[in-house]
Image (tube, rainbow, N blue to C red):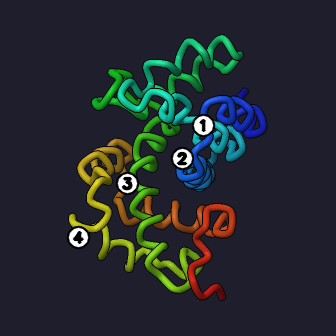
Amino acid sequence: MLTLERAKELNAQMVTEPHLIVHSTNVMAAMEGMARHFGQDPEHWKAVGYLHDYDYEKYPEEHLQHTQEPLLAAGVDEEDVRAIMSHGYGICTDVEPVTDMEKSLFTVDELTGIIEACARMRPHGITDLEVKSFMKKFKDKRFAAKCDRPLILKGCEMLGMDVKDVAQICIEAMKPYAAEIGLLGTDPV
């Protein structure tokens, strides 16, 4: 089973841009929350979340086309590689998310982008962000416009959950990582 330590080693070979490392950490945190929600192993889901954009920095136009073979060759389980591949479903892969882990990764990848953008606008960052404030920004299509809301909603539908509930889980899971992901705000508590 993939460990977070191993995921960080592998990711470090391909990902060096600070904003992509922050994104990996955001998704890692969100996946920890989703694992707890589903009664699964948080450490395992964190590792998969951290590694999900393994080839993106080097191959942004061919995302996930340079992921499967290198990760399998590095000893990552097929199940974990499949989960990583499934987060690009309908965009750059045809690997449909079927497990709770896969559906969660598919959903939180974009969702964490809106959460991060929302937290960056607040004096206390994510530390006091509530889902009600997030939902106002989520409904404003001009806010964090590059984040694919229909994809997030599709993922929530796959999970059988409301976006508000998934966002709540992700926000709470990201809070302990506020310093690491630069979301303590301009006026930390």
- Give the number of the mark in front: 3 or 1: 1
Residue position for label 1: 15
Front residue of 69 and 56: 56
Residue position for label 2: 20
Q: Position of residue 53 (x, y in %)?
A: 52, 36
The picture quadrant where one finds residue 138 is: bottom left
Q: Earlier in the sequence, mark 1 or mark 4?
A: 1
Q: Amino acid at mark 2?
A: Leu
- Give the number of the mark in front: 2 or 3: 2
Q: Earlier in the sequence, mark 4 or mark 3?
A: 4
Residue for point 37% across, 66% down: 164
Q: Amino acid at mark 4?
A: Asp
Residue for point 67% across, 29% down: 13
82 lies left or right of 157:
right
Residue position for label 3: 161
- C-alpha distance separating marks 4 and 2: 24 Å
Q: Earlier in the sequence, mark 3 or mark 1?
A: 1
Q: Earlier in the sequence, mark 2 or mark 3?
A: 2
- C-alpha distance separating marks 1 and 2: 7 Å
- Give the number of the mark in front: 4 or 2: 2
